Image (cartoon, helix red, strand yellow):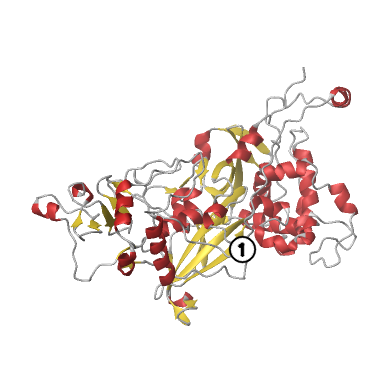
Amino acid sequence: MSSPPPAAPASIPFPPPCPHLASYRSSLSRPFRHLRRCLRACPLGNGPPSIRLDALAHPHCAACSSSSSPCPSRLLACLSCAQVFCPAHASSHPHHISVDLLRAELFCCSCRDQVYDRDFDSAVLRVFHDAFPITSPSTTAPAPTTRKRRRVHFHHWRPDPSHSHLIRTRSTPLHSISTHPCGLRGLNNMGNTCFINSVLQALLHAPPLRNFFLSDRHNRFLCATRSPPRNNKTNNTTHNGDHLCLACDLDQIYSAVFSGDRTPFTPAKFLYSWWRISSDLASYEQQDAHEFFISVLDRIHDNLVEDQQNSNNNAQGDCCIAHRVFSGILRSDVTCTYCGFTSTTYDPCIDLSLDLDPTHITRHNARNGERETKQKHNKNLSAPTTLMRCLEKFTRPERLDNEHKFYCQKCKERRESLKQMSIRKLPLVLCFHVKRFEHSTMKKTLRKIDSCLQFPFSLDMAPYLSSSVLRSRYGNRLLPAILDNGESEVGISSGASSEFEIFAVVTHSGRLDAGHYVTYLRINNSWYKCDDAWVVKVEESTVRESQAYMLFYVQKVLYYTAGDNNTIDEPT
């Protein structure tokens, strides 16, 4: 008799065991031992484990063959007499327990449902481990810690009588912006600096980054009095002794934007500091907004003093506010197509660069709120590209060609392989970079891709996590991806929320050499267009029809928390 199943959480009731399976186990001492040599493990991208069949064997359902109905693709084999039949004729079979030939899963003919057995599942996973061993993560980027995040309870601040008296007597009411969201202020163009203004608007309204600076976690007045570190590799001071710190300049911009003044602000000091720190990009020519975004986060990481104290946590994304907000971890699995050996590495990332994929959307695979489109009669007309299709292409297994052969540690030589990317850890703020600028190696030129990109306002990243990718690889069973520290991939990927809400869209219009960047901000479910110094309210359709170049999503719990009390009320 099989042992009772392990205890499950109270919120998820464990299904009762199948009595027919228990009867089958009690009749045999080792019921599934003869199935081990019949199990076949498939490498990455070729499906879950299945039952091994002879090359000349063509299993079919005898009942379906005698009738005019076509033979179904899913077949079952009885564990007692080895007869093959389909699920439709399983109830007429005299024995109870059978196995699915395609997915190697147990099926009860009397219950007409799949059944779970812990010993059978362990045997399937043992066969897969023996055929395709999984290596430990590479030392190029240490695996992140899997400690649970401490739950923080937020409470609204209520002033005591003394604070209320100070507010009434020492504060100035802001009458002019009572009907507008707080923080909406244009930025003046200082000569082809629209790429700077567009990225700054997105950074200014990123909830975790905004809360960090508005809560005085980085004070520019105290930072300027600190002496520069001894082993400072960046140029933080000029020859005149001026202090250069982009974090301090951002603190100044936050103070100016959220001060209540609606007149456009000129970020001249920020531009000066960025020019001095990034001298290779210092010019009045139009620059790429994505490159500027990466450069700003890198310089903030270099400038903040706490980076020097936590430099060992760089790969985990806990070293500075820029990495704590935008840093995630990617998982890369490279599998040898000859022997099935898999090598796994982890790499930190602060954004995801996606290729445009104009694949048609069908009603069967539409999700995340993407619009269902019907294929046109004209084959030259293709459906618009969606963000979900781009993410599916990003996590799809890719065959490495002869120029990028993988050195297999089991074969001891370079072999053709399959590479698959997935997301191991999600950041608080998720940034997508759409590759609209394509480089032609033959013509040695750059061209812009003007394809429309459909993106949802609410995004669920669960299908693209490492746990979901591994589940699709190993089939409908427990995941065997156990790390060195004993934690499973499922617990790591599901540690943070996978639901995100969009809050900023950076668009690019015009030609490659003479284009213009504009940012659309989503505040209190309303959209505002930030075109340098001009800030106007727009409709949702205007945002959807724009050519998105960078998309900024924040975890849904942070988005709705940031939306509370985001307007300035009139004093009573």
Query: In the rendering, at what x and y percent does residue 247 appear?
Result: 77, 51
Identify the residue shown where x is 56% and y is 63%. Answer: 483
Query: In the rendering, at what x and y percent does residue 81 appear?
Result: 20, 60
Residue 284, quarter of the rendered image: bottom right
Label tally:
1
Point out the residue furthest to the bottom here. Answer: 412
Identify the residue shown where x is 52% and y is 62%. Answer: 482
Point out the residue furthest to the top here. Answer: 572
Residue 48 visible in the displayed image: yes
Decide: is 170 above or below 340: above
Residue 269 visible in the displayed image: no
Q: Nearer the viewer, residue 571 or 450?
A: 571
Decide: is 235 above or below 369: below
Answer left or right for 532 relative to 462.
right
Q: Amino acid at mark 1?
A: Ala
Q: Nearer the viewer, residue 131 or 328?
A: 131
Answer left or right for 376 relative to 253.
left
The quarter of the image holding the C terminus is top right
Answer left or right for 339 relative to 159.
left
Q: Secondary structure at mark 1?
A: loop
Q: Around disc 1, counting alpha carbons within 10 Å, would you say few (fewer than 14), some (14 to 19), or many (20 or more)?
A: many
Decide: is 160 above or below 65: above
Query: In the rendering, at what x and y percent does residue 101 appear?
Result: 27, 59
| Residue ID for mark 1 | 143
Query: In the rendering, at what x and y percent does residue 460 appear?
Result: 50, 45
The quarter of the image holding the N terminus is bottom left
Q: Nearer the viewer, residue 160 or 388?
A: 160
Identify the residue shown where x is 49% and y is 42%. Answer: 456
Identify the residue shown where x is 65% and y is 48%. Answer: 149
Answer left or right for 142 relative to 262.
left
